[in-house]
Image: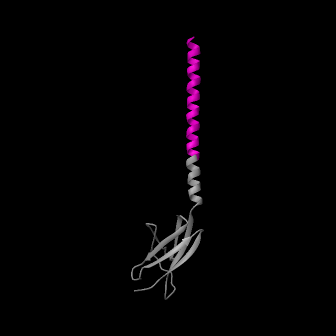
Amino acid sequence: MKTIIVLIATVLLSVSVYANDNKNDKNVKNVASTEAIQNVNTVDITGSVIDNNSKELLAGAAILIDGSKYYSNLDGNFSITNLKPGKHSVRVELISYQPSEIEIEVSKNQQISISLVQE
């Protein structure tokens, strides 16, 4: 009789552990698929910051968009990833240049060029 009770208890514990493992797998799959959907609904912007008069590329310019700050690299180029499609206000600042603010509408990956005028 003791053997049967131990055997039944072991089977019930095994089934319970297996059921919990399957629930955890489903939660992991749901989180992964949600992240994949969010990444599909984003766009990337690349661009450059140039001097309006000399047309030279400007390194170290601050690009502000959606509360985040990015900088142009030594070649005057920048990259903004995982941006939601739609309208965005982009502000660019650099010492000795007038700040520039533009409104952009993005629906797919695109490249923009922003000109700054010296003060």
Tell me if residue 42 can be seen. Answer: yes
Report the quarter where the C terminus lies.
bottom left
Figure check: 42 above or below 1:
below
Image quadrant where residue 41 sits: bottom right
- Please tell me whether the stretch drawn in magenta is mainly helix, strand or loop: helix
Report the quarter where the N terminus lies.
top right
Image quadrant where residue 93 sits: bottom left
The x, y position of residue 37, in whole percent, is 59, 55
Residue at 57 percent of width and 74 percent of height: 111
Figure check: 22 above or below 102:
above
Which residue is outermost to the bottom? 53
Residue at 55 percent of width and 72 percent of height: 105
The x, y position of residue 39, in whole percent, is 57, 58
Magenta run includes residue 15: yes
Task: Give the camera-side residue of 75 and 110.
Answer: 110
- Left/right placement of residue 49 relative to residue 15 reads left
Task: Give the camera-side residue of 57 and 112.
Answer: 112
The x, y position of residue 44, in whole percent, is 56, 67
Tell me if residue 61 can be seen. Answer: no
Q: Which residues are magenta?
A: 1-29
